[in-house]
Amino acid sequence: SQQGEEDPQALSIQEGENATMNCSYKTSINNLQWYRQNSGRGLVHLILIRSNEREKHSGRLRVTLDTSKKSSSLLITASRAADTASYFCATGGSFGNEKLTFGTGTRLTIIP
Amino acid sequence: DTAVSQTPKYLVTQMGNDKSIKCEQNLGHDTMYWYKQDSKKFLKIMFSYNNKELIINETVPNRFSPKSPDKAHLNLHINSLELGDSAVYFCASSHHFREGPSSYNEQFFGPGTRLTVL
């Protein structure tokens, strides 16, 4: 069954604005990961947040995790045209549960 | 020096044929995966191998048979192809890292193989 659901399904913003995507999941987790997929390409790992962490930064990315609400958000600040892609959250990826279960994805379009 | 590579990139074939997709990783990872991404971009795990041993088999029809000759390779063979098999198939690999009592893995994906069954 599908673990994560991203919201919104699609998002279009002007270059330079911030983009926020949300992910909800159903079961308890060890960690949550965000991946980016450019059109016609494979997925690229962006950031991993552990279940005991509430916030994590990596460059222009900021991820939050609220395990009580079973939700996570990905914020991309000062967006660029190159950020245009689909973004997926994924749970799993731990010893004994190696598989990743992906959400439905958010299609982000940055308008130059 | 591609980390995870797949061949072919595109595969167009007739219904009923048998085809294979190959995957190789040069990252030294122990675990490899096959995922299927459908037309709605939904990505789902199919199989996983750890050191050539099958550890995940997600209710995939037995027309799909993965083979891992060594831990750097995981191939996918599909018999009697059906229209519904049309999708993009991604190979991935990972290495577990431990922090205290917990372990995690980040997965590295190949570029995908777009399979079209006519």
Image: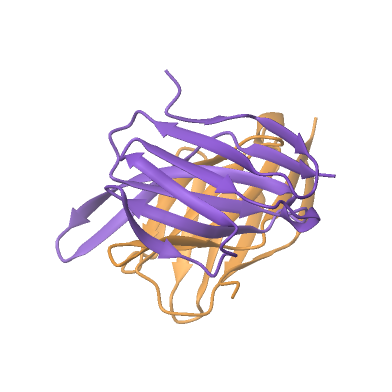
Determine whether A40 is above or below B39 in the image.
above
User: Quadrant where the C terminus of chain B lies?
Assistant: top right
Q: Residue at x 41, y 59 (%)?
A: A55
Q: Is residue A33 visible?
A: yes
Q: Within the image, what quadrant is residue B103 found in? A: bottom left
Q: Residue A39 placed where, x, y %?
A: 71, 36
Q: Is B13 positioned to the left or the right of A90 in the image?
A: right
Q: Residue at x 65, y 36 (%)?
A: A83
Determine whether B83 is above or below B14 in the image.
below
Output the letter for the chain in orange: A
Q: Colour of chain B?
A: purple
Q: Residue furthest left?
A: B100
Front in this rendered view, residue A57 or A96: A96
Q: Residue B60 placed where, x, y %?
A: 57, 65
User: Quadrant where the N terminus of chain B lies?
Assistant: top left
Front in this rendered view, residue B97 or B11: B11
Q: Residue A46 placed where, x, y %?
A: 48, 44
Q: Residue B46 placed where, x, y %?
A: 53, 59
Q: Is A40 positioned to the left or the right of B14 in the image?
A: left
Question: Across the whole image, how many numbered discs are drawn on residues?
Answer: 0
Front in this rendered view, residue A31 or B41: B41
Q: Within the image, what quadrant is residue B82 found in? A: bottom right
Q: Is A33 positioned to the left or the right of A43 in the image?
A: left
